Each structure stands twice: as C-alpha cells, then as structure tokens.
Amino acid sequence: MTTHPRDRHWFLVGLVLAAAALRLLPHPWNFTPVGAVALFGGAKFRHKGMALGIPILAMLLSDGYLGFHRLMPFVYGSFLVTTCFGIWLRRSGGVGRVVTASVTGTMVFFVVTNFGVWACLDSYPRNALGLWQCYAAGLPFLRNGLLGDLFYTAVLFGGLEWAQYRLPWLRDRESRVQATSWV
C-alpha cells in the first residue's frame, strides 16, 4: 500500500489538534497537553515552519475559546522553546531524551511564565523577594504541569509509535527504510 507523505502530515496535524482540544475539557490546573503538543510538533513535523506553527495554531484556536490574557507572550514563547527541544529530538530520539526534553520544557514553562506573572501583574513586589514568592506560589502548578506534560508526551509519542506499527503507511520515509533493511 503506497500513500503520499501528506497523509502522514494530515494524521499528525489531526493528532495535534485533537490533543490541543483536550484543553477545553475539565482538567486539574496545568494538567494539559500543550507542552507535549509543542514537543511532539517539533519532533514530528519535518518542516520547521510547520513544527513551530501547528502547535501555536492549536494554542490560538483553543485560546480563542478560553480567552486571551497579558501573559500570552510568555506562554507562547515558552512553548516555542519546547518546540525547539522537539526539533532537537529529531537528530537523536529515544525514550530517555524525550522524557528529558519534556521535563526541561516543563521547567522552561514554569520559569518563564512565573517570571511573567511577577513582571506583568501586580501580585508580587518587584524585587528579589517578590520573585521568589511568585516562584514558590507556582510550585503546585509545576507539579501538575510536569505530570500533564509527561502523561501527554507518552500518549502522543507512544500513540504515534503504536499507530505506525499498526498502519505502516504512517511511518516516515526513514522509518520505512529502516524497517525494510531488517528484513
């Protein structure tokens, strides 16, 4: 069975959009698929513009429903960094590197967005102690963010691996070459 590479592309787009839509369902604070979507998009979309654009588009679509706020540049910026971690995964993947990239992306999101809260909102004094208080107050959200990122990273990356096993036409060209070279 031969298929066009665009079939794989549209499958990936659908997977990313479906995962991003999960933000619209009730969930614990910060237990969302967005970090995993950014990492997955960076790792699986071959064109860098698509890798960076599809996760941001998914965010924009869901934020159009949920609402926008002043911290959006910090949120979107941190997810662009996570997408770059996904692009790094293309060269050398593996479960350990995917987990490391996911955890690192979670930490980037925590540091960047809490800095944004401290810098842009009037919730904390604009000094070192205020910044420290802001990060301390964000720790419960860090836990949920980490658990959500790891869970959804496993679902997206593992789900694609399972789908490629069941539907060989989903494999990218390099995977098909490797699979046939073992025969």
Image (tube, grey):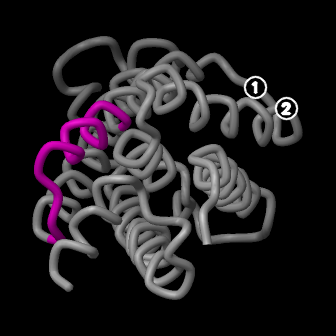
Q: Position of residue 97 (x, y in %)?
A: 13, 59
* Quadrant in the rendering for residue 53: top right
Placement of the N terminus among the 4 image quadrants = bottom right
Q: Tell me if mark 2 has few (under 14), some (14-19) or many (20+) residues whose alpha carbon lies within 10 angstroms of its own.
A: few
Image position of 28 (left or right of 38): right
Q: Residue at x 14, y 43 (%)?
A: 91
The residue singled out by tag 1 in the image is 68
* Quadrant in the rendering for residue 22: bottom right
Q: Position of residue 36 (x, y in %)?
A: 44, 55
Q: Position of residue 100 (x, y in %)?
A: 14, 58
Which of the two discs, 1 and 2, sits closer to the camera? Answer: 2
Image position of 155 (left or right of 5): left
**Amino acid type assigned to the residue bearing label 2 in the image:** Gly
CB atoms at circles 1 and 2 under 8 Å apart? yes
Alpha carbon of mark 1 to alpha carbon of mark 2: how far?
Answer: 7 Å
Q: Secondary structure at mark 1?
A: loop
Q: Is residue 33 above or below residue 154?
A: above
The residue singled out by tag 2 in the image is 64
Q: Position of residue 114 (x, y in %)?
A: 37, 33
Specify the principal SS of the magenta part: helix
Q: Tell me if mark 1 has few (under 14), some (14-19) or many (20+) residues whose alpha carbon lies within 10 angstroms of its own.
A: few
Placement of the C terminus among the 4 image quadrants = bottom left
Between 48 and 2, the one lying in front of the other is 2
Between 25 and 119, the one lying in front of the other is 25
Image position of 161 (left or right of 92): right
Magenta-drawn stretch contains 93: yes
Residue 106 is marked as none
**Amino acid type assigned to the residue bearing label 1 in the image:** Phe
Between 70 and 16, the one lying in front of the other is 16
Q: Residue at x 39, y 39 (%)?
A: 42
Q: Which residues are magenta?
A: 83-95
